[in-house]
Image: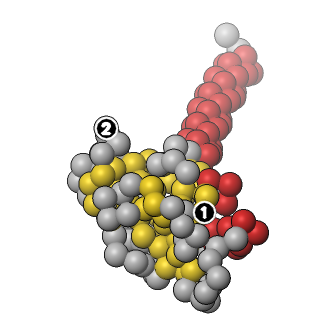
Amino acid sequence: MSNNLKKHIVADKVKWIAIFVIALALIGAVTTLFVKLDRQTTVTEIGAEAYVIGGLDENGEALEGNDSIVTRSAFTTDGLKATVAKDAAVTYALYFYDVDGKFVSATEALSADFDGVVPENAESAKIVITPTEDEDGVSLTEVLNYAGQVTVVVNR
């Protein structure tokens, strides 16, 4: 074999190794990107459409009235976070339920962000938002405003 042929074979091997390493790095980068995007898409915000005028009593049962708004149905406690808007004119309380939908407990009226600590056996929750400066009761047009003052986010 000539010296030029040996150099050519070695150069080809180096090129293939470099291509293989670049391909592995590209696969790793794409996989990491998909994992990060998947984590971002598993979070959902409870929107204003999830609320109705009403409340919950001390046993977590539906309560008629127009002093507050409440979520229509319970949502998961997985990743539960509640953030209050700056200058919010509301308080809120979280009501926790077990896997069978039985009431577990409720928080006191909160006016700060929720720390995410839920009762051990709680699987789902409802939120009651109560305006602090509304003497005539909540109207249908005010639901969006009050719901927008507390941002509730959970994992899917």
Is 112 on the left-hand or right-hand side of 139? left
Say what amino acid the circle numbered 2 marks: Asp
Reply above or below: 64 against 67.
Answer: above
**Quadrant holding the N terminus:** top right
Query: Which residue is situated farthest in the left direction here?
Result: 120
Mark found first going from the N terminus, 1 or 2: 1
130 or 35, nearer to the observer: 130
68 or 20, nearer to the observer: 68
62 or 39, nearer to the observer: 62
Is 72 on the left-hand or right-hand side of 16? left
- Residue 138: image x %, image y %? 64, 73
Colour style of the rendered protein structure: secondary structure
Is 55 on the left-hand or right-hand side of 138? left
Q: Quadrant of residue 116?
A: bottom left
| Residue occupied by mark 2 | 100
| Residue occupied by mark 1 | 53
Residue at 55 percent across and 86 percent down: it is 132
Circle 2: element type: loop
Q: CA distance from mark 1 to mark 2?
A: 25 Å
Circle 1: element type: strand
Residue 21 visible: no
Query: Which residue is situated farthest in the top direction here?
Result: 1
Say what amino acid the circle numbered 1 marks: Ile
> Which of the two discs, 1 and 2, sits closer to the camera?
1
Residue 149 visible: yes
- Residue 97: image x %, image y %? 33, 50
Q: Quadrant of residue 100?
A: top left
Look at the numbered discs 1 and 2 and tell me whether their residues touch, using CB distance below 8 Å.
no
- Residue 5: image x %, image y %? 72, 17
Label 2 CA crowd tier, 10 Å (few <14, some 14–19, many 20+): few
Residue at 61 percent across and 39 percent down: it is 34
- Residue 72: image x %, image y %? 55, 51
